[in-house]
Amino acid sequence: MSHSFNADAILKDVVAGDPAVPGVVAMVTDRERNIYEGAAGLRRTDGDTAMTTDDVFAIFSTTKAITATAALQLVEEGKLDLDAPASTYAPEIGELKVIEGFDAAGEPILRAPKRPVTTKHLLLHTAGLGYDFFSETYSRLAQEKGQPSVITASKEALMTPLQFDPGDKWEYGSNMDWCGQVVEGITGKRLGEVFQTRIFDPLGIEDMTFELTDSLRKRLAGMHARGADGSLTPMDFELPDKPEVHMGGHGLYGTVGDYMKFIRMWLNDGMGPNGRVLKPETVAMAEKNHLGDKKIGMLPGVIPSLSNDAEFFPGLSKSWSYSFMVNDEEAPTGRPAGALGWAGLANLFYWIDRANGVGGFWATQILPFGDPASFTGYMDLETAFYASLKAAKAA
């Protein structure tokens, strides 16, 4: 299919805007190949290196779907029971207690959970786990009790209390970091090694890793902090290059081109150019809403430097699959009901539309999450793409 949608103009506008985005890479793919690749702006605002399509990004929570894919492979092989206690495979998750608040002395009030956390709970973000930048409770534990942030990539960062009994509701958090621990427990290998042999090699992914190397660092897009006045300040931000834990929820670095290969695998019923990653029936099962009537809501920005209040398609019903957001109704962009998508903390966004066989990825490196300039640019790209698709079908 040929698409004459003016994506280059959208990218140029967003780096020239007020407020501006420092630099952006965006790509759109069909089932066969990328049908759009673009880059605009600068790698860092304090330099003059232009952003290029093979720049390396901290991809944050867009890591999650890759971790889910590794878990689904183990389900196919009969090695992972989604309904068994996750502690069967990652014993330490069985130590987590439910926090019911804080006592008069400021100590956490803890009790045993009513039921064990399962890997299904982890895939669906219903285990009770949170993030300090979206949870007042976790933020208080970090400030008053020294609970380390997940970006430390430490085992201790995972040992957080549950905010409610597993299965009771949806709350976004460190679930997929624990899912990565489940995968490691079953395979006996580090998550990065599992990804390399079981996902990256079959997909021809070359530059995706939990451990940033000097050669990749040379192509690294710089992180920027957005000020209240709209200004951008370059940050020397990097995740640990020798992480104690390969964090399945957010730890990968990679290129947009490599992520497109992962998106195409989901568009092609689990098939990659160098071999099969998932069975077609697994993909068909995984893409469905597995939350039942529980819907996902706004992510409240608790730490202003890390996230604004953020929500996709406010007012529309949204569910969760293994392991993507599902929009239950057609989105204002033209994304059809039942499509998949999600995001990463530094304002990276993607969608996977299996019905039309298309998907896209928009990558910036800006904190806090929910950056109006980057998010609006992404929505504009997706909207322009669907307008062109509709026009092509009508022609």
Image: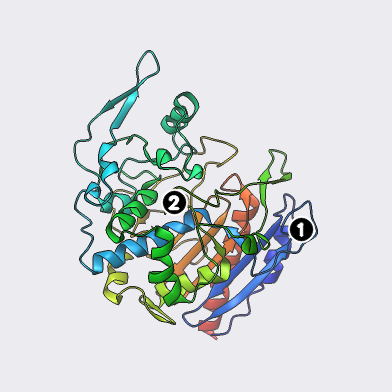
- Mark pair 1, 2: CA separation: 35 Å
- In the picture, the disc for residue 247 is 2
- Find residue 163 and report its image quarter: top left
Compare residues 326 and 78 and report the one nearer the observer.
78
Instruction: Tell me residue 275's x, y (percent).
Output: 38, 81
Seen at 65% across and 52% down, the residue is: 373
Instruction: Tell me residue 288's x, y (percent).
Output: 30, 63
Q: Are marks 1 and 2 in contact (CB under 8 Å)?
A: no
Of the numbered discs 1 and 2, the one sitting upstream in the chain is 1
Give the SS element for disc 2.
Answer: loop
If the image is split into quadrants, where does the C terminus sit? bottom right
Going by the numbered disc 1, the residue's amino acid type is Ala
Q: Is 193 on the left or on the right of 290, as rendered?
A: right
Give the SS element for disc 1.
Answer: helix
Which class describes the residues within 10 Å of circle 2: few (<14), some (14-19), or many (20+)?
many
Can you see residue 293? no
Can you see residue 17? yes
Going by the numbered disc 2, the residue's amino acid type is Met
Compare residues 118 and 331 and report the one nearer the observer.
118
Q: What residue would you read off at disc 1?
A: 16
- In the picture, the disc for residue 172 is none
- Find residue 320 and report its image quarter: bottom left
